[in-house]
Amino acid sequence: MSLLKSVYFWLILTFLAVVYASQHYTIGGWEHLRIVSKQTDAPKPTSDGGTVPKFDNRSWAPARWVSAPSVVGDIAPPKPKIPSIRIATLNLQGFGENKASKMAVLEILARVLRSFDVIALQDVQPDQGDVLPRLVDRINQSDRAYDYCIGPRVGKGLNSMHFAFVFDSERVDIDRYQLYTVDDPMDQLEYEPLVGWFRTKNVHEEEAFTFSLVNVRISPPYADREIALLPELIRTIVRDGRDEDDVLVAGDFACGNERMENLRRIGMRFALEGVTTTVASDEMLDNILFPAKATDEYLGRSGTIDFLRQLNLTPEQAFQVSNHMPVWAEFSAVEGGVPGYAP
């Protein structure tokens, strides 16, 4: 048989096999077929059917950013099955128009901050007055109800900033009439702390956990001097007329807990001990402190959110958000803690 006849013979057999298969079998699964370019910069598929965004490193504006889910556990560990709230602190490192104009930065911040019920923010610089509302609007795009309070500008010159609280209004209340900046007539602190008074919701009002939250930023050049002043600052806030014994101090302390033994000596407990809190994993700067005896609402759970690794960012992308990781601690939503539960 010649070569041409052999080829012709096999073509006829193949055609008959295809006709037979089409009459007796159904081929499924075509609705899931997708064609992706072989280019090295093509978007990669994710587990939810979306794509990982491609970044322009010059302005860091993603071609497409997958919307962040509103599930708390997507970033932070899941909460225990008891009434609780999660309090956090984050130094935003110059959160002004430049950062707020980058949608990828806003999306990362929104996704991270949704994990918490109250967040003490440092270094907010609203040059145009609306950068914080834009961040809160971004958080609330996932059907949440976050709100904010912002204090006056503190500090001097180019290093001045605002402190702020962002909070889930469905989980906690803030008394806006009792929001105040600590008076520092002798100018002993570079940045006067912002103090807010909060009450948990979704529990009986008489059982709600109430607490004062002190938002601080210690100036690195004067860290030793300012850390030495913190015990008296805490005592002053305890005596501010609200009769609140749960005074929590959250923020950037410019040092680790080993340099704050004076606070341990007055009965303050540290949410974190010897843990790096920077994206570069080279320093411990941020923490949450609370009175060990008075605040028995603490559930013994705390940590950091390493958004660089958890969101698969490059160091350059993460640093555009902040070099600080959020630090969080968890507390019972019931005053005095939950009976039968001990951290």
Image (tube, rainbow, N blue to C red):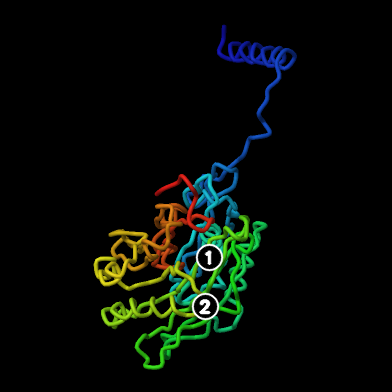
Alpha-carbon neighbours of circle 2 within 10 Å: few (<14), some, or many (≥20)? many
User: Would you name the residue on which mark 1 appears?
Assistant: 210
Name the secondary structure under disc 2: loop
45 vs 218, left or right, is right
Q: Residue at x 34, y 66 (%)?
A: 268
Q: What is the distance, in whole Å, between disc 2 and disc 1 at their CAs?
A: 31 Å
User: Would you name the residue on which mark 2 appears?
Assistant: 96
Q: Position of residue 170 (x, y in %)?
A: 64, 60
Q: Position of residue 47 (x, y in %)?
A: 55, 41
Q: Residue at x 28, y 59 (%)?
A: 274
Q: Nearer the viewer, residue 192 or 6?
A: 192
Question: Could you say which disc has been placed on residue 230 in the image?
Answer: none
Which one is earlier in the sequence, the residue at label 2 or at label 1?
Answer: 2
Q: Nearer the viewer, residue 39 or 126?
A: 126
Determine which quarter of the picture holds residue 313.
bottom left
Q: Is residue 146 above or below residue 159?
A: above
